[in-house]
Amino acid sequence: MFVRRKEHHHYFIHVPGCPFLSSVPPEDLVQVENVATAFSEGYEMCSLCSPLRQKLRVEEERISAFCQENGITYVLCNKYIAVSTPLSQWRIVIADNEADTELYHRNTIRQEPNIPPFLTHYHDQKIRFPRLLPYFQYILHHDNYRLRRPLPEKRKGAPPKKGSQRYRKLMKQKKQQEKSRSARKVVAMIDNLQTKGKSRRKTRKTG
Ligand SMILES: [Zn+2]
């Protein structure tokens, strides 16, 4: 659970018991139901009581060693921990219960709906770990997997090589198009004959 002050000029959300709030009477505090909504409204995480900071502090030595070894960089921002590798970008965000964390991955394919503004261009990786280091290990694993199995690039304009799967697909498409084109021609011819016949009959009747 997070709290914030009632007055709107204090744009920070805190963990209850944050030293910054020690002089604030409880009736001047409101509960923050949804962190993502608060962030969207312009709130930021208090840097003193940020659970992300606390979590990072506990594991910092191991995380920083792991990142140095593997070319990963990370920075604690006021809404998330931003993680980048030469291949990918990630955000570790805090959950509403303030204890759990969530992992978001920068989109390579599509934009997903219902993503709060502070995570635009990211999607929920649906990965949850109680500690932070496993996220970094997961990210490295994900990069290695992606290196072995790159996403298909969109090649526009370049004609497919003869014998390739794309070439066969294109040929099949062309054949299908030709087939339907000649079928349409036949239908048009029959239509033409029928209308000619009708008009001939009509002229015979009236004439
Ligand atoms: Zn605080």
Image: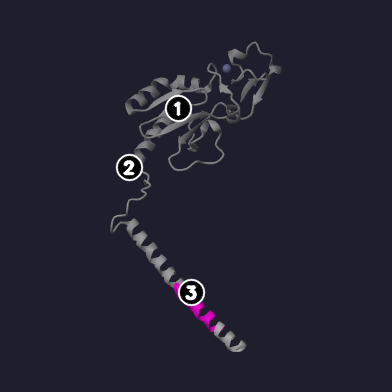
The 10 Å Cα crowd at callout 2, few under 14, some 14 to 19, many 20 or more, is: few
Disc 3 residue type? Ala
Q: CA distance from mark 3 to mark 2?
A: 53 Å
Judged from this view, the residue extending furthest toward the right is: 27
Question: In the image, which disc is placed on residue 148?
Answer: 2
Q: Earlier in the sequence, mark 1 or mark 3?
A: 1
Q: Which element is circle 3 on?
A: helix
Location of residue 76 with respect to 139 vertically, above or below: above
Provide the residue designation for mark 1. 82
Q: Which SS class for mark 1?
A: strand
Decide: few, some or many residues near mark 1? Use Cα within 10 Å; few <14, some 14-19, many ≥20.
some
In the rendered structure, the answer to whether residue 97 lies left or right of residue 190 reads: right
Q: Look at 56% across and 22% down and name the residue there.
A: 44
Dots 1, 3 in contact, CB < 8 A: no
Pointer 3 residue: 188
Which quadrant would the C terminus be assigned to in this image? bottom right
Question: From mark 1 to mark 3, how far is it between C-alphas?
Answer: 63 Å
Say whether residue 186 is magenta. Answer: yes
Give neighbour class at mark 3: few <14, some 14-19, many 20+ (Cα, 10 Å). few
- Tell whether circle 2 marks a residue whose Cβ is less than 8 angstroms from ligand 1: no
Name the front one of labels 1 and 2: 1
CA–CA distance in space, label 1 to label 2: 24 Å
Residue range (magenta): 185-198
Type of amino acid at the residue the image marks with label 2: Arg
The mark that comes first in sequence, 1 or 2, is: 1
Question: What's the amino acid at mark 1?
Answer: Ala
